[in-house]
Image (spheres, grey):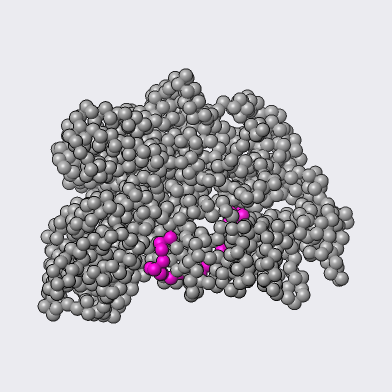
């Protein structure tokens, strides 16, 4: 902050205005429904009364004498002829009426109970922190049941609440409407002590104030009228509503004075209540909305605050800024990675303030003469006395230039080298806003290096991006130190690089570094220069060629830019895709010895790549220059090489084409065979599937094999130099599946993971016969993209294609909302100086961040340092004999003192295996300790926000497909985004609860025992054992059991008999071997007999409720029971299971049976596996933080409005998230104080946010100054 | 949840870390170390299944020794509160 804020808000207290206060603050009583008279002057006592403030710039306010710029506006009031209820407090009014006596207004619980509750609230036993909150609820429950007041002994009546505003009491003499007046009287008798127990603060909110006697009239500045082009004055919606209130109020007053019949007066009171209600909230259910003359519903107070475009989210949390710009982006590989190309026209509008000094005087003079219309120029000059000169209006700029003095402020054009912030929405993670250096270029688009696309998730199909110019020296310094592209190379999500080569850069580096690439000395020198090499050129590798010349290898060119002591080994993607040699890429002492450079070496989002290693070992700047040099020469190389892909590259030999077709025919034949088998009932069934399902599964399997074969046949028929193949194998773009679909066959089209069956009667399209079994008629596409699809195939393809589109649209919405909730729940969480993770109110979430205090962004792929890398690089220069074991132990002990147990172990183990000399070990340890200390998190770090981003951002990349059949298995579980949302929602029950039950040591290898145990677990209902049931509606039911089912479930008639004995409505008459006769007790009509029958069928005779299905799975030599449905407490009691390892995916069940700590562990497990399953890498530290936060209050809290975001200490933060208006009114009645410690609150009031660099301040000891 | 509801000893379950009540003195030390009020610690209910058999009362502080993926082993503290 360059200018100190003069005033700062310390706290905000919320309270309810009492009628007296309303009158006290009022500067005018408003009585006239008219606003302006014929002359256009505001009517005295009207809604536009001059005393309420002023709108027009020239006018002076009648109350404070200020002009419109400085007058804050003043409240007026309306005296209501009859009191009305305040709609925002209607629920509280209802609850108070229920809780208090109708006669003495005491709480309807005994004095003892009151004292008891009061003790809890007052004695401040801190461990009642949670239980305390339930007191109002408990009182309400108790009072509701009370029939007689324990204090005065008066009888209490039932209360009927007709929403939104009518209360009726059911007295002995009939129904009696409670008018606001009566309610007010009752409420004013309630004692302060009584309402304190209910959570009210009597100082800020007496319940009688919920009934309005005077209505505050907001100042005109709140509801300005606008003058349309036609000269007609148009009033604000609020003014319209106030006019309605005044009119009705006036009529009511008159009719009361005139002695009109009470019925008519009551109608007017109701109308007044309606207008007062809609004035506060025009979306109350149960009453019609108030409309504008044009038919548009009025936007009244609640509507102004609520929702995305409301005051909180629209105007206070999100603010418009100056010095920003937005336009289309396009690529420019000639730029530096950290640069952004800016059109000259934009550069001439955006300015940077620069103070004139002796050192920049000449330059400033020059650009001032250039003026606003010539680049680089100046738009404004601010003199030290504060006068701002706009250079557009200056005729002779040279005079100004001549008079320029030190201390003038020059607002100059943006020019090369300035630092700006560049952003693409949606801003899902911190790398969505990065600092770039300006490069002013011709053209009309922002230019950026294609390699910075991944962090922004940008492409060039019309994307637009935003640019912000920091104006203060501090802001620029911060941007430069924290936000530049090279400082964001490593993603904090997983501690690996997010920036790297992509597309043609990958292809190019493959082409450059493959074994047979040779470069002439001339070319080599040119490339070296282009990459910025300035050293001595190496000796060419290939000498004495046919023409006697010397040639360099491509690998030599690549090696030029590697650090000289760089060593590295990796398996390239290319090697994996071709011959499968392991660790083919070898770099020794900065020389690429063998292997090709492809995606795994320099690709984006590739951990352990060359780029990652350089960034970690030599620093970000080195990594950036390396990447810049490589990319520019690769770009040049591939441009000259000439690399293209077209139809001709997809042409197949005739015989290959024939083979593909016959392969598909073969598969079709197999499918027909399967169908035939299914018809004959000879199809081998998989457990748990019906024959129909099994057949479908087999067919799908067969057809997918056909597609794979067609694809691979096509793909293998192309030679190694095929452009598509190069791209697929090196990882530049596409996969062999894509090539297969272009040249081979497209394969099965699907919807929701199923083949296409429906659409018309028994067929997918009207062109097929009913129940056609041909794979063609169920969406199998034999054609490929190159040859084109037949019209029917095209339709099928469109069906599958649409699903993809819908899926993306739904997914972005869902993941966007999840991200918003995560951010809201975690934004205020930061790292404190003592290493704990806390919210700004001091509540500890973690005692040590990530349990080891390591910052993932500064880590090496999640590890504070890579010990093996250190050892390897030491090994090359290490001399002397290997250290002895006890020597290593000693040295390690000395250096690893501050390490955590796991790291200690890992380091020691690696050192023991290293065979390094003693000095070597010492050096490695020293370096390790140094790196460890550097990788620690810094105080103030916004760990919460980074966590939310690291979990929210991958959400956008997840699949939405809810179910997943792992092969031909019968258990399906929710996966991907829906599962992630379910977990952070902390639902009571997941959509697909399942358990994994391991067996006891003794019996785990026996299938027999596993089956026996499974039978005890699986819920068996009578309905599933029965073959038929004979119902005699008058007397009896006969259950006939299916003997094979009885045997399968291991149930006996006897046990069924005993279970049924508890049913009071029937008697077990007689039992046969496989049947039971049940006699009905009493007489029943047909429907109730059916009800009894259903109850019998649903009776559980064996097993555990909720467990719907069990499957035995063999893993290694042990059997595991997997279930559908989950019931942990009951399963734990089953004999023969391993109670130590039983797992369920129902986290809240774990919380209730195993405790909160177990739930936290389960949550971590579930989140990790959900993310891993989708191939998304997220560091455990983030998952731990979310789990710890959700479990920090002793019970599972949801990430959302009912959980963490809803229980935040800050009123403003809660209001800005969701349920705006009820939050505020509740804050008012309990007299909450907004302490402005969090993030959102401070954004709203416009102060610095207390996180990251915002918590750092400079303190000066004033006493020591002299 | 009632004490009688649990027949099985759950403290051996892989998900349940070691919970122990710490003495008043040690509790003081913890609060001092982290410079916080007891309510600023993470909470745990007095009837949490993992501590119900330890004989806790509201106001105690529980030390939890967690198995950690990052640190091998780590300590966590929770303040026992009324339900």
Report which quarter residue B22 is drawn in. top left
Report which quarter residue A534 is drawn in. bottom left
Location of the C terminus of chain A (image quadrant): top right
Residue segment shown in magenta: A312-338
- Residue plotted at (60% across, 34% down): A139
Report which quarter residue A725 is drawn in. bottom left
Instruction: Say if the magenta span includes residue A313.
Output: yes
Give x and y (percent) for residue A120. 59, 27
Give x and y (percent) for residue A348. 57, 70
Q: Is residue A635 left or right of residue A477?
A: left
| Residue placed most toward the observer, A873 or A345 | A873
Give x and y (percent) for residue B78. 45, 30
Query: Residue A1133: in sight, yes or no?
Result: no
Q: Is residue A1087 left or right of residue A887?
A: right
- Residue plotted at (13% across, 64% down): A677
Instruction: Say if the magenta span includes residue A957.
Output: no
- Residue plotted at (77% across, 52% down): A216
- Residue plotted at (36% across, 70% down): A802
Q: Is residue A244 left or right of residue A1190?
A: right
| Residue placed most toward the observer, A300 or A549 | A549
Give x and y (percent) for residue A1189. 45, 40
Query: Residue A461: in sight, yes or no?
Result: yes
| Residue placed most toward the observer, A587 or A1225 | A587
**Number of numbered discs on residues:** 0
């Amino acid at each position: 902050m360059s200018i100190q804020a003069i005033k700062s808000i310390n706290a905000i207290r919320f309270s309810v205005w009492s009628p007296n206060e309303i009158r006290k603050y009022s500067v005018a009583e408003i009585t006239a429904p008219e606003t302006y008279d014929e002359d256009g002057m505001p009517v005295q006592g009207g809604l536009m009364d001059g005393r309420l403030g002023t709108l027009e710039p020239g006018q002076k306010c009648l109350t404070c004498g200020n002009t419109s710029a400085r007058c804050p506006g003043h409240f007026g009031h309306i005296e209501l002829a009859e009191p009305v209820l305040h709609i925002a407090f209607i629920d509280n009014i209802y609850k108070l009426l229920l809780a208090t006596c109708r006669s003495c207004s005491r709480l309807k619980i005994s004095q003892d109970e009151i004292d008891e509750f009061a003790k809890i609230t007052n004695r401040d036993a801190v461990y009642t922190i949670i239980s305390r909150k339930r007191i109002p609820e408990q009182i309400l429950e108790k009072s509701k049941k009370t029939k007689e007041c324990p204090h005065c002994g008066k009888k209490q009546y039932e209360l009927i609440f007709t929403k939104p505003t009518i209360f009726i009491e059911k007295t002995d003499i009939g129904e009696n409407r409670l008018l606001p007046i009566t309610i007010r009287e009752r409420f004013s008798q309630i004692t302060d002590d009584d309402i304190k127990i209910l959570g009210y603060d009597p100082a800020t909110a007496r319940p009688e104030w919920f009934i309005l006697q005077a209505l505050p009239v907001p100042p005109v500045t709140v509801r300005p009228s606008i003058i349309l082009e036609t000269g007609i004055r148009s009033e604000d919606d609020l003014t319209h509503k106030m006019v309605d209130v005044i009119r009705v109020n006036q009529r009511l007053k008159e009719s009361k004075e005139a002695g009109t019949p009470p019925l008519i007066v009551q109608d007017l009171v109701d109308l007044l209540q309606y207008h007062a209600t809609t004035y506060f909230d025009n979306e109350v259910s149960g009453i019609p909305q108030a409309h504008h003359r044009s038919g548009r519903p009025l936007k009244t107070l609640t509507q102004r605050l609520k929702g995305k475009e409301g005051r909180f989210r629209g105007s206070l949390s999100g603010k418009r800024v100056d010095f920003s710009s937005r336009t289309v982006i396009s690529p420019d590989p000639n730029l530096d990675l950290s640069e952004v190309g800016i059109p000259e026209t934009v550069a001439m509008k955006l300015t940077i303030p620069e103070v004139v000094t002796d050192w920049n005087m000449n330059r400033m003079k020059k650009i001032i003469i250039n003026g606003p219309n010539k680049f680089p120029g100046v738009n404004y000059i601010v003199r030290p006395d504060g006068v701002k000169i706009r250079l557009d209006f200056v005729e002779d700029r040279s005079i100004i230039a001549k008079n320029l003095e030190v201390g003038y402020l020059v607002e100059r054009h943006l020019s090369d080298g300035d630092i700006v912030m560049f952003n693409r929405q949606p801003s899902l993670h911190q790398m969505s806003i990065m600092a770039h250096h300006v490069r002013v270029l011709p053209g009309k688009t922002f230019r950026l290096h294609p390699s910075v696309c991944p962090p922004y998730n940008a492409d060039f199909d019309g994307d637009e991006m935003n640019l912000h110019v920091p104006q203060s020296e501090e802001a620029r310094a911060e941007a430069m130190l924290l936000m530049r592209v090279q400082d964001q190379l490593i993603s904090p999500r997983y501690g690996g690089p997010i920036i790297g080569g992509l597309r043609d850069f990958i292809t190019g580096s493959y082409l450059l570094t493959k074994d047979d690439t040779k470069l002439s000395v001339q070319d080599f020198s040119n490339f070296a220069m282009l990459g910025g090499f300035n050293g001595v050129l190496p000796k060419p590798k290939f000498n004495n060629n046919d023409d006697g010349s010397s040639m360099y290898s491509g690998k030599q060119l690549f090696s030029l830019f590697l650090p000289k002591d760089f060593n590295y080994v990796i398996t390239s993607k290319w090697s994996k895709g071709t011959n499968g040699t392991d660790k083919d890429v070898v770099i020794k002492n900065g020389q690429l010895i063998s292997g090709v450079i492809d995606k795994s070496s320099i690709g984006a989002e590739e951990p352990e790549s060359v780029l990652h290693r350089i960034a970690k070992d030599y620093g970000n700047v080195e990594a950036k220059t390396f990447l810049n040099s490589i990319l520019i020469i690769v770009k040049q190389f591939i441009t000259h090489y000439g690399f293209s892909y077209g139809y001709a590259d997809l042409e197949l030999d005739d015989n290959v084409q024939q083979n593909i077709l016959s392969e598909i025919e073969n598969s079709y034949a197999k499918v027909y065979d399967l169908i035939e088998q299914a018809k004959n009932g000879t199809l081998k069934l998989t457990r748990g599937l019906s024959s129909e399902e099994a057949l479908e599964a087999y067919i799908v399997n067969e057809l997918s094999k056909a597609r794979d074969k067609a694809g691979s046949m096509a793909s293998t028929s192309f030679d190694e130099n095929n452009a598509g193949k190069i791209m697929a194998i090196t990882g530049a773009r596409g996969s062999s599946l894509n090539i297969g679909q272009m040249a081979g066959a497209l394969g099965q089209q699907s919807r929701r993971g199923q083949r296409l069956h429906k659409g018309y009667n028994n067929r997918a399209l009207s062109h097929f016969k009913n129940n056609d079994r041909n794979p063609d008629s169920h969406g199998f596409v034999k054609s490929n993209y190159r040859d084109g699809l037949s019209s029917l195939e095209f339709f099928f393809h469109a069906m599958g294609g649409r699903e993809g589109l819908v899926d993306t649209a739904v997914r972005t919405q869902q993941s966007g909302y999840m991200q918003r909730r995560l951010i809201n729940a975690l934004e205020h969480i930061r790292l404190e100086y003592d290493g704990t993770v806390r919210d700004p109110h001091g509540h500890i979430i973690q005692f040590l961040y990530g349990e080891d205090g390591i910052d993932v962004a500064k880590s090496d792929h999640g590890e504070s340092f890579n010990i093996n890398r250190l050892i390897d690089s030491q090994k090359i220069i290490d001399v002397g004999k290997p250290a002895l074991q006890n020597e290593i132990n000693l040295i390690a002990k000395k250096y690893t003192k501050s390490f955590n147990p796991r790291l200690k172990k890992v380091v020691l183990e690696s050192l023991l295996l290293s065979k390094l000399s003693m000095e070597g070990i010492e050096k490695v340890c020293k370096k390790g300790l140094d790196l460890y200390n550097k990788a620690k998190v810094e105080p103030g770090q916004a760990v919460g926000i980074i966590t939310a981003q690291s979990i929210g951002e991958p959400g956008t990349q997840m699949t939405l497909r809810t179910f997943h059949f792992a092969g031909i298995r019968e258990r399906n579980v929710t996966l991907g985004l829906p599962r992630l949302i379910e977990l952070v929602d902390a639902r009571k029950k997941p959509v697909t609860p399942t358990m994994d039950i391991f067996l006891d040591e003794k019996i785990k290898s026996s299938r027999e025992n596993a089956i026996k145990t499974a039978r005890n677990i699986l819920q068996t209902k009578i309905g599933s054992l029965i073959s038929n049931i004979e119902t005699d509606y008058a007397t009896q039911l006969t259950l006939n059991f299916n003997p094979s089912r009885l045997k399968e479930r291991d149930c006996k008639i006897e046990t069924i008999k005993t279970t049924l004995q508890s049913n009071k409505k029937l008697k077990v008459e007689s039992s046969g071997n496989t049947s039971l006769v049940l006699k009905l007790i009493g007489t029943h009509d047909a429907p109730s007999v059916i009800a009894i029958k259903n109850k019998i069928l649903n009776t559980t005779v064996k097993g555990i409720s909720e467990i719907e299905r069990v499957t035995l799975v063999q893993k290694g030599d042990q059997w595991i029971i997997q279930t559908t449905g989950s019931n942990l407490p009951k399963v734990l009691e089953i004999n023969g299971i391993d109670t130590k390892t039983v797992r369920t995916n129902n986290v809240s069940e774990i919380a209730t049976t195993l405790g909160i700590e177990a739930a936290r562990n389960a949550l971590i497990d579930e989140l990790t596996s959900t993310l891993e399953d989708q191939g998304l890498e997220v560091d455990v530290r983030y998952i731990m933080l979310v789990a710890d936060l959700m479990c920090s209050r002793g019970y599972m809290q949801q990430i959302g409005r009912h959980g963490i975001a809803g229980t935040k200490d800050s009123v403003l933060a809660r209001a800005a998230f969701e349920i705006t208006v009820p939050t505020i009114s509740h804050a008012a009645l309990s007299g909450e104080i907004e302490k402005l410690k969090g993030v959102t609150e401070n954004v709203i009031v416009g102060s610095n946010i207390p996180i990251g660099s915002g918590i750092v301040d400079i303190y000066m000891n004033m006493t020591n100054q002299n | 949840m009632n004490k009688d509801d649990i027949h099985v000893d759950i403290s051996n379950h892989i998900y349940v870390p070691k919970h122990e009540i710490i003495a008043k003195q040690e509790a003081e030390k913890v609060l001092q170390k982290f410079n916080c009020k007891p309510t600023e610690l993470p909470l745990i209910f007095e009837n949490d299944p993992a501590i119900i058999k330890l004989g806790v009362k509201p106001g105690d502080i529980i030390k939890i020794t967690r198995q950690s993926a990052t640190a091998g082993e780590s300590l966590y503290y929770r303040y026992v509160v009324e339900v």
